[in-house]
Amino acid sequence: MDFGLMSLGDHLPDPHSGGFELDQAGRHRSFVEQAVLAEALGFYSVHLGEHHFSDYILASPPVVLAAIAERTRSLRLSTAVTLATHLDPLRLAEDYATLDLLSGGRLEIVMGRGGFTRAYEVFGQSLADSRAIYDESVALVKRVLEEEAVTCTPRFRPPLREVTVQPRPLQRPHPPIWIAAGSSDASFDLAADLGLHLMVPTIFGPAAHFSARVSRYRQRIAAAGHAPERARVATSVHTYVCRDSQDAKTFWRPYYANYLDWLAGVLRDQKEGPEVETDVESLIDGPAMCGSPAQVVDQLGALADELQMDLHLAMFDLGGLPEAELRRSIELFGTRVMPEFGA
């Protein structure tokens, strides 16, 4: 199993002091420094989220990933997720092909639909069209990255007549593409039909909630005739590791609650969108991994037994957690948890 470091880029005050340890510039610099630390600890990849018009201030992952590329040598550079519904697929392909070149072929892309209605309103899009836009965009990004002189007539953008996206990515036929899929069979099927990797949001639900759909994906991608190595599955979990298991939940709970309370407020303001669990007690004793290294090893082992994932993303960076504590948690995970799984 490979391990990735994940951040969605919330910028929230410390729940105890009410103040910010870092301003927005410092927060972006922290994303880079976390990635440098992750490479030193043996992580496989770093995954940065994309959101718009909210206190998730990480809006341009390819720019930050380019900065990380210049400070690292082996770390895979990925998103979590790229909001394919909001981006022109050709511009998306250009940006990420450029990143693939600059990083020496280390790019991976996780594509997601996005469910925050504010972004759809500001970008002038209809949430009702999001599935159709997303499916078209994913297929088109894949096609223009692997083919030249593309001619087609999409529904949601002008026709293409022998268009070749430049620059061409270094990885062929295209950089690895993952599909983020949660409760919709359509996303699992899209990944399988196109022969793309699958990422499931175990952040907000136990593994058992996803096992049937993951099995469906594996069966469908094999039936479609794709090579076995295409059927890669990733999981993602909110994580905090502390040397003393007695202190872990006591220390982390205010920061985790700070993040979840903010997220619940964002979701309440939406006209429609996904249902997401935001109760801290349900999550801290369930899908989240919080405890000593030994406890997290046990929790991660149980998740692996259920889903047999190839990649696991740990998200430490949330709720205003102090930078020093953030680094200690990442270091404990890298030195005491990952080695138990051969990483």
Image (cartoon, rainbow, N blue to C red):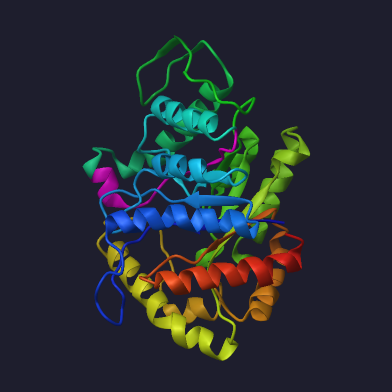
In this rendering, would 111 be left or right of 233?
A: left
- Looking at the image, which residue sits at the far bottom? 246
Depth check, front residue: 307 or 320: 320
Span shown in magenta: 105-121
Q: Residue at x 34, y 43 (%)?
A: 128
Residue 115 located within the stretch drawn in magenta: yes
Q: In the figure, residue 40 lies in which quadrant?
A: bottom right
Q: Quadrant of the C terminus?
A: bottom right
Q: Does residue 234 sit above or below 11 in this rendering?
A: above
Q: Position of residue 182 (x, y in %)?
A: 52, 55
Q: In the figure, residue 157 lies in which quadrant?
A: top left
Depth check, front residue: 53 or 306: 53
Depth check, front residue: 243 or 236: 243
Q: Residue at x 38, y 54 (%)?
A: 29
In this rendering, would 189 be left or right of 315?
A: right
Q: Residue at x 37, y 29 (%)?
A: 88
* Residue 221 visible, this angle: yes
In this rendering, would 28 be left or right of 343?
A: left
Q: Position of residue 123 (x, y in %)?
A: 25, 39
* Residue 4 visible, this angle: no
Q: Position of residue 2 (x, y in %)?
A: 68, 54
